[in-house]
Image: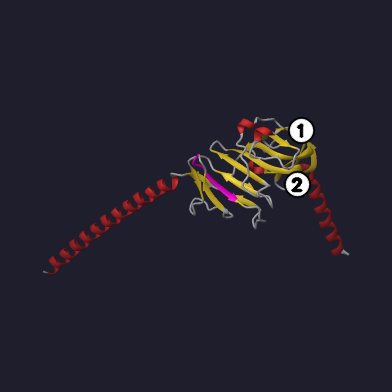
Amino acid sequence: MLHNFKHLKILLITVLLIFALSGSGCLGNKTPEPIDLEPGHPSGYELDSPPDDVTNLTTFFLFANKTIKAVTIITNTPSLDIFIPVDMSRSTTKKEPDIGDIVVLGSSSPLADHSNPSAFSNVSFNSTYTSSQGKNTIHFDFTQPITGFVAYSYALEQSQFLLSRNETVIVVLPEGYDAGNFILGPLRPKPDSRSIDIDGRVRLQWDATPPIHNYINVKYYKSSLPTIMGIMVIILGAAGLATAIYFNSQIRKLRQMRESMESDVKK
């Protein structure tokens, strides 16, 4: 009887904790709520055509001022979900995520060509916001399936990117920056390709195969940093070697003085 009472007590405490966490928002808001998003202008984004045979692609353009501009390619799509980890928002205290400059351009024709963004027009949409399990979800509903671009901007606090399954992801580093140094932070998972664009920026691509990891971890740094660190290591190494040689010389001199004094005492 006492044993059953203890189990019942534990169950009641567990239920109360769940309700308390749900009420305080720790478990997140799983009910989609309508959200008004700040519109942007297409000129603020690089609307490039996707690589061959790629119909589902998001490109993240990173900037040194801790912002990201993302462009998602869609093809004959009636709706779209955008996932933003909560810790990537500068305004984590806000109910809505720190996302804005929304641009939705498209065409109702599934054969529309992404290589000519000027042929697309603004598309009306309804948007809702959901927060759950450490990420914000922005859901777009279009009046009809469209082919085109969805672009948006948000703040960056940590160099970690959500990798959606079955989606090709490209990360473009700021000009003059690099990533992948085994000391400063390896790329996880390893990208499928790496290239330099016409502006001298590093482009990292992960193909649409289902990933082993749920997140792409990109830690980027100024391209000159490894060289500076190498020079510092050489300087410190040279200083350490010089110090070792100096102390070794002093120890030899002291040893010779001691041997000389011992020889004089023996005489």
Q: Which mark is residue 124?
A: 1
Does residue 116 appear in the picture of this structure?
A: yes
Q: Which x, y percent locates residue 164?
A: 68, 50
Q: Is residue 147 left or right of residue 257?
A: right
Which mark sits nearer the N-terminus, 2 or 1?
2
Q: Regarding mark 1 in the picture, which secondary structure is present there?
A: loop
Q: Callout 1, which amino acid?
A: Ser
Q: Which residue is mark 2?
A: 27
Q: Callout 2, which amino acid?
A: Leu
Does residue 95 appear in the picture of this structure?
A: no
Q: Are marks 2 and 1 in contact (CB under 8 Å)?
A: no
Q: Is residue 16 magenta?
A: no
Q: Quadrant of the N terminus?
A: bottom right
- Image height check: is 7 above or below 200? below
Magenta region: which residues?
Answer: 199-205
Q: How is the image coloured?
A: secondary structure
Choose top left, top right, bottom left or bottom right for residue 40. top right
